[in-house]
Image: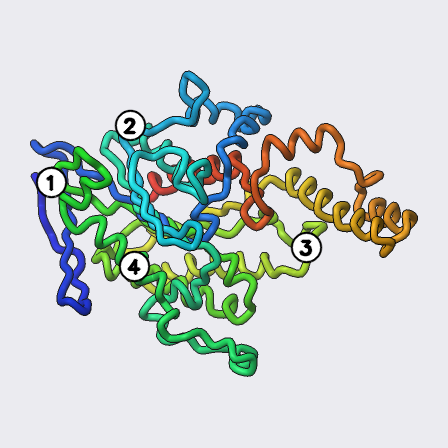
């Protein structure tokens, strides 16, 4: 049996756009396509190069993952029953990619974001076909770029006013509208869906199954944005559910985990208010449930990326970065040899040279900067899988 029901009517400049979801129960037409929306900024895009996958096998705890993400020939798997429609920007150009879940839906054709581990896990756990609609753009804030409609106009800080840095009205909420527009465009009909999922069955239909949000760095770097993040996130969840007419849509907030679960204990880069920002993300989930009717509670959760951040790799990152700067200053006679060794001793860097073990670990495990989770495949695959596991648990509630 298939029930057809409109879930969104949105007024636009050319009239009304209506798109429908087929709310399905198993019947003669087979199983509906399960649709998951993934959205955010650069860490949802994904920086992990496939060359870092081998390092997953260096840790006995993560080594079993290699059997899930690599085929019999040792190459990254291509999912059989999970697809991606991805809108982003590459090289300054708007880019749309479509196809089966595989490597290549990150920063470039050799990188991944959370969708890789997410899609692989769902591919193995579900009998239904899966479509991931992913929208992600680097360097975007929730306060301005993804600002949801119900949050109202952006109110600049005194500092922004005095510095002439007030965002243009056209910029505010632009990427929220882009995100929702891409979802509507992808799902507007069978022909559109078959651009991604060639064998999509109109009679079986599709089911909007969940939403994952993974974003935060740009808001974290602005105290004015931190102060309003909890409220903006609540508006964002509410607006997404309302526009999709899915008031119980399972929703995950991926919590910023750069520097791990205890950012204040870090030895380096202590100036960033990571802990304060993480609190706003956890608070958004708790306060959202407090504001909605009882029947809508329990379907919004936070999943912390902090446990998947590689602290040992971060230590190597900072050793490379800091000793590199000191050596530059030493060469330019801006620092003495004695001062150089004192700095190395202060941070327990020994003589400042990267050891053979550290070099091997770095070369195998990292492919990007610290704010991009060091471009670690181990981090992105594990976190993507954790998001999928959490989503499946949410669907059972």
Q: Residues within 10 Å of mark 4 (few under 14, many from 20)?
A: some
Foreground pick, 387 / 77? 77
Q: Choose the circle earlier in sequence order: 4 or 1.
A: 1
Residue displayed at 39% across by 53% down: 93
- Between the C-alphas of marks 3 and 4, the distance is 35 Å
Q: Is residue 71 above or below residue 150?
A: above
Q: Earlier in the sequence, mark 4 or mark 2?
A: 2
Question: x%, y% of residue 83?
Answer: 29, 37
Q: Residue furthest right?
A: 338
Q: Which residue is mark 4?
A: 240
Q: Secondary structure at mark 3?
A: loop
Report which residue position mark 3 lands on.
269
| Residue 261 point in image, percent of width and height | 58, 48
Q: How much space separates mark 4 and mark 2, taking CA atoms? A: 29 Å
Label 2 element class: loop
Residue that label 1 marks: 202
Ranked by sequence position, the earlier of labels 3 and 1 is 1
Residue 32 or 328: which is nearer the viewer?
328
| Residues at marks 4 and 1, CA–CA distance in whole angstroms | 24 Å
Q: Is residue 225 visible?
A: yes
Q: Quadrant of the C terminus?
A: top left
User: Which label belongs to residue 80?
Assistant: 2
Left-right relation of 316 to 385 = right
């Amino acid at each position: 049996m298939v029930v057809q029901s409109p879930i969104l009517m949105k007024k636009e400049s050319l009239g009304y756009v209506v798109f429908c979801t087929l709310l399905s129960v198993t019947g003669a037409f087979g199983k509906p396509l399960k649709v998951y929306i993934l959205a955010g900024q650069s860490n949802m895009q994904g920086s992990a190069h496939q060359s870092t996958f081998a390092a997953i096998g260096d840790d006995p705890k993560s080594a079993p993952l290699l059997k899930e993400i690599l085929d019999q020939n040792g190459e990254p798997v291509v999912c059989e029953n999970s697809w991606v429609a991805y809108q982003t920007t590459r090289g300054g150009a708007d880019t749309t990619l479509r196809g089966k879940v595989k490597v290549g839906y990150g920063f470039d054709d050799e990188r991944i974001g959370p969708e890789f581990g997410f899609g692989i896990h769902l591919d193995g756990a579900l009998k239904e076909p899966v479509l991931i609609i992913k929208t992600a753009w680097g360097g975007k804030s929730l306060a301005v770029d993804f600002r949801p409609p119900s949050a109202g106009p952006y109110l600049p800080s005194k500092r922004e006013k005095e510095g002439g840095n007030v965002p243009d009205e056209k910029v505010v909420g632009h990427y929220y509208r882009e995100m929702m527009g891409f979802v509507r465009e992808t799902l507007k009909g069978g022909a559109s869906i078959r651009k991604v999922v060639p064998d999509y069955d109109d009679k079986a239909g599709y089911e909007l199954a969940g939403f994952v949000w993974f974003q935060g760095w740009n808001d974290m770097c602005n105290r004015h944005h931190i102060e309003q993040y909890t409220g903006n996130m609540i508006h964002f969840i509410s607006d997404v559910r309302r526009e999709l007419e899915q008031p119980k849509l399972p929703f995950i907030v991926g919590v910023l985990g750069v520097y791990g679960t205890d950012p204040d204990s870090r030895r380096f880069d202590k100036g960033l208010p990571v802990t304060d920002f993480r609190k706003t993300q956890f608070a958004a989930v708790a306060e959202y449930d407090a504001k909605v009717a009882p029947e809508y509670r329990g379907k919004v959760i936070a999943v912390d990326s902090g446990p998947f951040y590689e602290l040992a790799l971060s230590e190597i990152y900072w050793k490379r970065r800091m000793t590199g700067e000191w050596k530059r200053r030493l060469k330019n006679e801006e620092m003495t040899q004695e001062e150089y060794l004192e700095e190395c001793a202060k941070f327990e860097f020994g003589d400042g040279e990267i050891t053979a073990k550290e070099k091997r670990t770095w070369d195998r495990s990292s492919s990007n900067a610290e704010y991009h989770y060091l471009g670690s495949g181990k981090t992105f695959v594990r976190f993507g899988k954790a998001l999928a596991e959490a989503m499946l648990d949410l669907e059972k509630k």
